[in-house]
Image (spheres, rainbow, N blue to C red):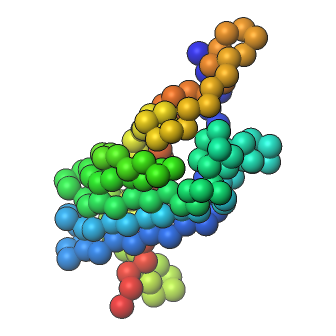
Amino acid sequence: MVISTVTGYFREFEGSAEAETEDFQGAKVKFSAKIDSIDTNQKDRDAHLKSADFFDAENHPNLTFEGHIQGDELVGEISIRGTKKPITLAVDFGGVAGDPYGNTKAGFEISGKLNRKEFGLTWSAVTEAGSVVVSDQVRLLLSVQLVKQA
């Protein structure tokens, strides 16, 4: 049993989507995040996540994803800590609209999960009560807003 869910994000990242249609079907998607920018609102935990026990940011500075949108799924490969694996994520396309500043934007909610141990993030500990400190399963939830480029 895990006591609670810890949320976090990467402060430094970049991504792109190349689409031929406004519904983004078949769109090519790329994403990368700098591991050193991880933020869970607790500095000691963040330092541990960056260490060789987890992401090993010194030797593997980036997390990357490349794939495409297929129906209501984002299908591709994610690379974490030098290990590349296929992954399928659920996509909820919110649509395309203009903002008050003249930009055309598309919105998405993307979700899924992965097993951290499949990527070499194997550190584990147990509390005095016998509970797992860190779950093997990591839930992913991304709120994405893309701005159309000329």
* Figure label count: 0
Q: Quadrant of residue 112?
A: top left
Location of residue 23 in the rendering, given as x and y in whole percent from the top left corner = 23, 67
Which quadrant, please, contains the C terminus? bottom left
On screen, residue 33 versus residue 45, left or right, reads left
On screen, residue 149 versus residue 41, left or right, reads left
Location of residue 123 in the rendering, given as x and y in whole percent from the top left corner = 62, 31
Location of residue 53 in the rendering, given as x and y in whole percent from the top left corner = 65, 39
Q: Residue furthest front?
A: 59
Residue drawn at 72 percent across, 8 percent down: 129
Towards the viewer: 25 or 28: 28
Q: Quadrant of residue 106?
A: bottom left
On screen, residue 141 versus residue 1, left or right, reads left
Asked if residue 46 is positioned above or below residue 135 in the image, the reply reads: below
Towards the viewer: 14 or 77: 77
Towards the viewer: 82 or 144: 82
Residue drawn at 25 percent across, 59 percent down: 69
